[in-house]
């Protein structure tokens, strides 16, 4: 009998990660999730799925968390079908106001945590011919005043995805651009944007909310879910690429249609 698929998802407590987790619990498989907190909605999901989800409460940048994730993959048979690297934070400040320690701390969360978990997971992903789905951003390719750290970490994510796909022919990799999504991250951006965004960008980000232009997090989550499950063939032309969830080539993966 084939073993059930195993999925790992980081940042599963809120926003895009939580919506992706909700899709994953509806299909056969075992889920290993990570976040620092367990808000009520996640708590209900965990309590209703005790035999289906192992949740680790901690920081993605803590290698002990990665080790616990890997131990659980081993205990569950040692094959990993999809590694969803979703955690990201987006602090805003001009370069001359950011200490090097802050750069290092954010790089640890947004980038080195991905490197650490992906690297440890390679042998298990290879066994399942699995997928690595990394959450990137338009900020990876569009410079913005005040967003140096975020832009740089996401640019690194894109290149990491590309090289991983070159080196590991058994693993499929993609760096996704989810668009501007209605999550806690956007709330946080609106709170912080006066710290470094230009007047034009402040207006733009205010208007996303005012004009209801923010995407429902279910939209990117449906794309992530459909790229993760082994029932769907991975779009090989996108292997290693940085791709918007609105790209025509991902249309059939976007099963949540906004009204
Ligand atoms: N929202 C957007 O408009 C947008 C646009 C482009 C790209 N993205 C990218 O999409 C991804 C998800 O964003 P989102 O909008 O869903 O963000 P979000 O609503 O802020 O959720 C972030 C998730 O990451 C977790 N997290 C944050 N820091 C962590 C840490 N150090 N260790 C463990 N977990 C941590 C949070 O949970 P806890 O607080 O419980 O730890 C939460 O579950 C990010 O990589 C982001 O850069 C988002």
Image (cartoon, rainbow, N blue to C red):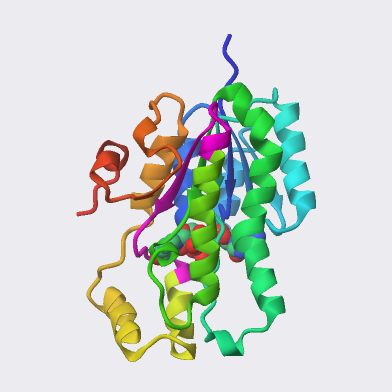
* Quarter residue 226 falls in: top left
Depth check, front residue: 224 or 1:
224
Q: Residue at 42% x, 67% y: name it.
A: 139
* x then y, percent, for residue 230: 46, 26
Q: How many marks?
A: 0
* x then y, percent, for residue 174: 45, 43
Q: Which quadrant: the C terminus?
A: bottom left
| Above or below for 111 versus 240 | below
Q: Residue at 31% x, 61% y: name it.
A: 215
Q: Residue at 77% x, 52% y: name it.
A: 63
Is 178 colored magenta in this rendering? yes
**In the image, which residues are magenta?**
165-185
| Above or below for 217 versus 250 | below
Q: Residue at 62% x, 22% y: name it.
A: 127
* x then y, percent, for residue 85: 56, 49
> What residue occupies the far right of the structure in this picture?
64
Q: Is residue 17 left or right of residue 54?
A: left
* Quarter residue 107 falls in: bottom right
């Amino acid at each position: 009998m084939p073993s059930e698929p195993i999925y790992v998802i980081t940042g599963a407590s809120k926003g895009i990660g939580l919506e992706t987790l909700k899709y994953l619990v509806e299909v056969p498989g075992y889920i290993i999730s990570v976040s620092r907190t367990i808000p009520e909605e996640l708590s209900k999901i965990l309590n209703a799925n005790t035999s289906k989800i192992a949740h680790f409460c901690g920081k993605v940048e803590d290698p002990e968390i990665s080790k616990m994730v890997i131990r659980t993959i081993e205990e569950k048979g040692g094959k990993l079908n999809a590694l969803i690297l979703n955690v990201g934070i987006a602090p805003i400040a001009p370069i001359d106001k950011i200490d090097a320690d802050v750069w290092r701390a954010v790089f640890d969360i947004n980038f080195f945590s991905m490197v650490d978990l992906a690297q440890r997971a390679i042998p298990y992903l290879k066994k399942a011919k699995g997928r690595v789905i990394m959450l990137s951003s338009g900020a990876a390719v569009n410079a913005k005043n005040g967003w140096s750290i975020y832009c740089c970490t996401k640019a690194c994510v894109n290149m990491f995805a590309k090289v991983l796909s070159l080196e590991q022919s058994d693993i499929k990799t993609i760096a996704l651009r989810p668009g501007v999504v209605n999550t806690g991250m956007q709330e946080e951006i609106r709170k912080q944007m006066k710290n470094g965004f230009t007047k034009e960008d402040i207006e733009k980000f205010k208007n996303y909310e005012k004009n209801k232009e923010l995407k429902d997090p279910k939209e990117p989550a449906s794309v992530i879910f459909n790229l993760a499950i082994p029932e769907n063939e991975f779009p090989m032309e996108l292997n290693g690429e940085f791709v918007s969830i609105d790209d025509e080539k991902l249309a059939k993966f976007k099963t949540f249609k906004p009204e």
